[in-house]
Amino acid sequence: MVVLHPSPDVQLTVELLNLGSNEVLPTSTPAAELLATLRSRRRRPHTRTLTHGPLELDPDLHVATLGGTPMALTGKEMTLLLMFVTTPGQMRTHAELAGALWPEQTHVRTNRLEVMLSNLREKFRQAGIEQPYRRMRGMGVRLKDAEEFEAELKTD
């Protein structure tokens, strides 16, 4: 995945790369260079699929499945899942999640993040998981354990 950002600094670039991006380029990148970068990405062998129990994410192809059921995700929903899957069991604060989803904004209303989490939760429901998150007041939110996902899919 190639991310374009108006003004990527080192900290943001590191965070985006840790979340699954392959490259971070400024939006001022000339079109010819951007197209060459994208063509180069397509020539590279595809080898990365992340799993969390029955949840499989392919950030390079922007594909997600849950128990074999495809999940149509937006870019921000994929970013959110990548944050959770790459740090299993770790609570993520609203500030961390909002910072990764909307890095260009210094203040994001909590409601905006809750809408994003709700939309993603609905996609999990459609694929067979009623409640994908664990929340701890004052601590944050994380995905349920992989084993919980597997057990819930088996009981349906």
Image: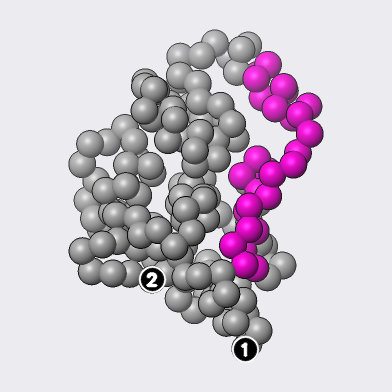
Q: Residues within 10 Å of mark 1 (few under 14, many from 20)?
A: few
The answer to whether 60 appears left or right of 94 in the picture is: right
Determine if residue 108 is in view. Answer: yes
Q: At which x and y percent is residue 93? A: 29, 54
The amino acid marked with disc number 1 is Thr
Quadrant where the C terminus lies?
A: bottom right
Disc 2 target residue? 134
Residue found at x 47% / y 70%: 144
**Marks 2 and 1, Cα distance to the nearest angstrom?**
19 Å
Range covered by the magenta-colored residues: 35-61
Q: At which x and y percent is residue 31? A: 58, 14
The answer to whether 26 appears left or right of 50 in the picture is: left
Nearest to N terminus: mark 2 or mark 1:
2
Whether residue 138 appears in magenta in the rendering, the answer is: no
Q: Are marks 2 and 1 in contact (CB under 8 Å)?
A: no
Q: How is the image coloured?
A: one colour
The vertical placement of 31 against 69, above or below, is above
Determine if residue 119 is in view. Answer: no
Secondary structure beneath dot 1 equals helix
Disc 1 target residue? 155
Whether residue 53 appears in magenta in the rendering, the answer is: yes
Residue found at x 78% / y 27%: 43
Residue found at x 57% / y 75%: 147
Residue found at the very far bottom of the displayed protein: 155
Q: At which x and y percent is residue 70? A: 67, 62
Q: Nearer the viewer, residue 57 or 72?
A: 57
Q: At which x and y percent is residue 89? A: 44, 62
